[in-house]
Image (cartoon, rainbow, N blue to C red):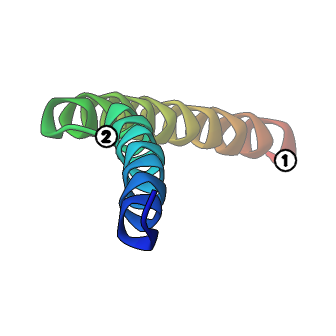
Amino acid sequence: MTETNLQLADTNKRLAIVEMDVAVIKSNYARREDIAKSENTLLKWFITTAITLAGLSGSLAFLAARFIH
């Protein structure tokens, strides 16, 4: 084989490796739907946590005021 054919064969092997790497990277992409779903889930957790903490702190303040007076 000539040197050009050897280089071409090596280039084809390396290209196949790069194509496999790109396929793996693409399979791990976060799509818009995935991000929107995660955003909605986080928003629900934040709102629920805020309401719970507000209720808990209000209850503790009421309880403390009741025992102080």
Q: Which residue is drawn at 24% across and 28% down?
A: 37
Q: Which of marks 1 and 2 is nearer the N terminus?
A: 2
Q: Residue at x 52, y 33 (%)?
A: 55
Q: Residue at x 48, y 46 (%)?
A: 17
Residue 64 location (% of width, % of height): 78, 43
Q: Residue 51 carries which label?
A: none
| Comparing labels 1 and 2, the label whose residue is closer to the camera | 2
Residue 59 location (% of width, % of height): 63, 32
Task: Give the residue number, with chain letter if any, for mark 1.
Answer: 68
Frontmost residue, 36 versus 69: 36
Determine whether the residue tagged by mark 1 lies in a helix, strand or loop: helix
Type of amino acid at the residue the image marks with label 1: Ile
Task: Give the residue number, with chain letter if any, for mark 2.
Answer: 26
Is 1 situated above or below 50? below
Residue 62 location (% of width, % of height): 64, 38
Task: Name the residue at the left extreme.
Answer: 32
Frontmost residue, 11 versus 57: 11
Frontmost residue, 59 versus 19: 19
**1 and 2 marks in contact (CB < 8 Å):** no
C-alpha separation, residue under disc 1 versus residue under disc 2: 62 Å
